[in-house]
């Protein structure tokens, strides 16, 4: 008799909880609780909405389940996959039971910045990768763990980045911010000492942001950038790839020798408004200048002097869809650009 009463009470409490979340939330809630005596659950390893395969004992798969909330996460789980659901918010405390999480994947949901708790990720001190791309975020979540190395925030509605939102993230190496509404990032990235890859394609940037020292890959295509500050790339001496295609760059907006950086391997300036070939380093290997308004082929942009010992390391050169032709290329180019297989004009 007492057991029956206990069951009814528990059912009432948890059914009231389910009204605030999804119809299955009370099941995962019961499954995750540890009761004493006869009511203790035999299997508390996985919520009913998800799969926890025995061959991947630390992973929890909850993707594409039409979930409206983050389910209970057992303490032994390290990898949780919640992509492609209908989740709009995450309350503080949701992950407090699973502080060993290493990966949290919440891509392709409907996350709203106003519905994410201020400290929801704070206790995840081992978190390595956080995927929040393809949501409806308007700002970077606060108090992110400094253990994160890979942060994905692309395809959201972020318009600006507060300086404190990335403060102290000393281990962050990869940052995806493409396809947002960011107009000016200022110096928000300068303190990211480990950042090697920054992707800000398809935003509304009007200028190149201040770059961190160890950056190696920079993607700024499809913005509104009209100029590049003098010395901006010398601040990142390890930079190897810089892509600024599909912007509004003009000759006036490029200081002399701004791209003459010794470590740069690939430079993409295609689909801009340049009329001259900018001066580049002799170490550059791939240069993309197609679809500009270039009217002359200046060999001095590649080689300050032309002889048998001084030549460019360039291997790929695209100049097609400009206002020059093959006859505009001087004969001396065969010495300076001896490693280029062919020049597209």
Image: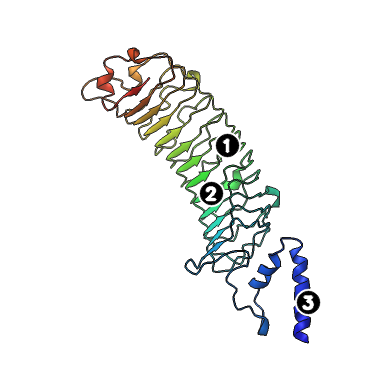
Query: Mark 1 near mark 3, Cβ–Cβ under 8 Å?
Result: no
Q: Is residue 98 left or right of residue 319?
A: right
- Image position of 289 (left or right of 51): left
Which quadrant would residue 290 be assigned to in this image?
top left
Location of the C terminus by quadrant is: top left
Count how many numbered circles sit on residues in the image: 3
Q: Nearer the viewer, residue 345 or 263?
A: 345
| SS for dot 1 | loop
Dot 2: what SS? strand
Q: Return the residue at label 1.
A: 185
Task: Indicate the quadrant where residue 315 lies.
Answer: top left
For marks 1 and 2, give the CA distance: 16 Å
Give the distance between the C-alpha atoms of the residues marked 2 and 3, in whole angstroms.
Answer: 43 Å
Quick one: SS at disc 3?
Answer: helix
* Residue extending furthest toward the front: 65
Is 114 drawn above or below residue 45 in the view shown?
Answer: above
Question: Most extreme residue toward the left, as rendered?
Answer: 308
Residue 158: % across, % down: 63, 41
Q: Position of residue 30 (x, y in %)?
A: 68, 72
Snapshot quadrant of residue 300: top left
Q: Which residue is mark 2?
A: 151
């Amino acid at each position: 008799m007492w057991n029956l009463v206990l069951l009814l009470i528990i059912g009432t409490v948890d059914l009231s909880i389910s009204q605030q979340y999804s119809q299955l939330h009370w099941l995962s809630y019961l499954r995750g609780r540890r009761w004493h005596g006869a009511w203790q659950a035999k299997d508390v390893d996985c919520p009913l909405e998800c799969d926890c395969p025995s061959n991947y004992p630390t992973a929890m798969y909850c993707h594409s389940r039409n979930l409206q909330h983050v389910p209970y996460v057992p303490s032994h789980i390290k990898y949780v996959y919640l992509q492609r659901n209908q989740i709009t918010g995450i309350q503080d405390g949701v992950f407090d039971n699973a502080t060993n999480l290493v990966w949290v994947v919440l891509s392709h949901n409907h996350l709203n910045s106003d519905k994410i708790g201020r400290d929801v990720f704070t206790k995840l001190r081992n978190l390595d990768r956080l995927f929040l791309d393809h949501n409806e975020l308007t700002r970077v979540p606060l108090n992110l763990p400094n253990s994160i190395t890979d942060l994905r925030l692309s395809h959201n509605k972020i318009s600006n980045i507060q300086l404190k939102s990335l403060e102290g993230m000393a281990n962050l190496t990869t940052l995806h911010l493409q396809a947002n509404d960011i107009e000016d990032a200022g110096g928000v990235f300068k303190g990211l000492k480990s950042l090697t890859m920054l992707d800000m394609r398809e935003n509304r940037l009007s200028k190149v942001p201040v770059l961190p020292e160890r950056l190696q890959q920079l993607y700024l295509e499809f913005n509104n950038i009209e100029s590049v500050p003098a010395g901006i790339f010398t601040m990142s001496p390890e930079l190897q790839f810089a892509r600024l295609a599909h912007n509004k760059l003009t000759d006036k907006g490029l200081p002399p020798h701004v791209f003459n950086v010794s470590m740069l391997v690939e430079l993409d300036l295609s689909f801009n408004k340049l009329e001259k070939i900018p001066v580049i380093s002799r170490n550059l290997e791939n240069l993309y200048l197609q679809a500009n308004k270039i009217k002359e082929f200046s060999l001095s942009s590649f080689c300050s002097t032309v002889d048998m010992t001084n030549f460019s390391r360039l291997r790929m050169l695209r100049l097609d869809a400009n206002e020059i032709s093959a006859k505009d290329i001087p004969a001396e180019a065969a010495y300076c650009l001896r490693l280029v297989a062919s020049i597209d004009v």
